[in-house]
Image (cartoon, rainbow, N blue to C red):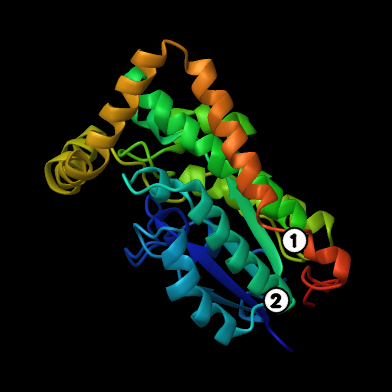
Amino acid sequence: MIPLRVAALGDSLTEGLGDRAADGAWRGWAALLAGGLAPLAEAVELRNLAVSGARTPDVLHRQLPSAQHHRPQLASVVVGVNDTLRAAYDINAVARNLDATLGALADDGALLLTACLPDPGRMLGLPASLARPLARRMRSVNEVVHALSERYGAVHVHVVDCDWVHDPRMWSVDRLHPSERGHRALAREFHALLAARGVAAGPAPGAEPTGAAPGRAAGVWWMATRGTRWVLERCTDLLPDLLRLAAAEVRQRSSDRLDREAAALTAAVLAGLGPDRRGSGVGGPGPLKAVS
């Protein structure tokens, strides 16, 4: 039996933060999905290359070479939130990095998996003046992901449109990473789309968690250990930039105008990526047969 080779690229979401396996290691939606791609678990070789904190240049320059060495038939690329959480955010760079990553995997014949993601400002419950600039950035990143997913024929999950996104049970104590239930929901979304294409030949991941959900004490412990460090890092990096953007909104007195400017910039960035390479016969995977 020739195994189905799968590569998972991205950040902490794909690494699995928020969902621990029985041995205590992070598991996550990619591993849960891999278990349902074939009738036998050993018929799938998953290489999870995702790393917490990764941004689009990290995926392109560090994770992509390892993924290509694995020669995946199925490759997920879910990244972009960390790009929006940095003062150096640049939608043009994000688009170029994603286009290069997805294009390289598609050229190698991989069927791609992508997802648009929720606004981190809303998930963290930031004040509106700080949340709006983050929301604007995330909309731009999602617009790029939508366009590139269509360009390369990716299996795309509109996470922001899923009803379960607004269920608190789907998120871990840090509000940014899915809980086990949330990881299972995302894996099931991908499984349904892959099954419709005849790729997922195994059972869908179960919806109900098998481990105990973290209690209130876990939230206090996270903030006392990792959470405080995260907030301090963002205060020295992201917060000054957000305050600058918030001040710009006050001066403009119109979020709508800034929204239109961001949308126009994103459209220009996408236009600058060049024509759809699928029209020239380059890029985009061929049919992927299910493993049996």
Badge 1 is on which residue?
Answer: 152
Q: Nearer the viewer, residue 38 or 121?
A: 121
Query: Does any portion of residue 277 appear in the rendered image?
Result: yes
Q: Is residue 227 left or right of residue 74?
A: left
Badge 2 is on which residue?
Answer: 73
Neighbor class of circle 1 (other Cα within 10 Å; few <14, some 14-19, many 20+) is many
Q: In which quadrant of the rendered image does the N terminus lie?
A: bottom right
Name the residue: 63% across, 68% down: 75
Query: Does any portion of residue 162 appear in the rendered image?
Result: no
Q: Amino acid at mark 2?
A: Gln
Q: x and y percent of residue 257 in the render?
A: 53, 19
- Considering only order in the chain, which callout, 1 or 2, is on the residue closer to the N terminus? 2
Q: Amino acid at mark 1?
A: Tyr
Q: x and y percent of residue 247 in the render?
A: 30, 21
Q: x and y percent of residue 158 in the render?
A: 65, 40
Q: In which quadrant of the rendered image does the C terminus lie?
A: bottom right
Q: Nearer the viewer, residue 184 or 108?
A: 108
For residue 284, the mark is: none
Q: Secondary structure at mark 2?
A: loop
Rendered position, 285 above or below 165: below
Residue 139 position by quadrant = top right
Q: Nearer the viewer, residue 139 or 230?
A: 139
Name the residue: 26% across, 27% down: 243
Q: Is residue 128 left or right of residue 1?
A: left
Name the residue: 46% across, 30% down: 135
Gap between marks 2 and 1 measured at Cα: 14 Å
Q: In the image as oriented, which residue stretches furthest toward the top?
A: 253
Rendered position, 290 above or below 193: below
Neighbor class of circle 2 (other Cα within 10 Å; few <14, some 14-19, many 20+) is many
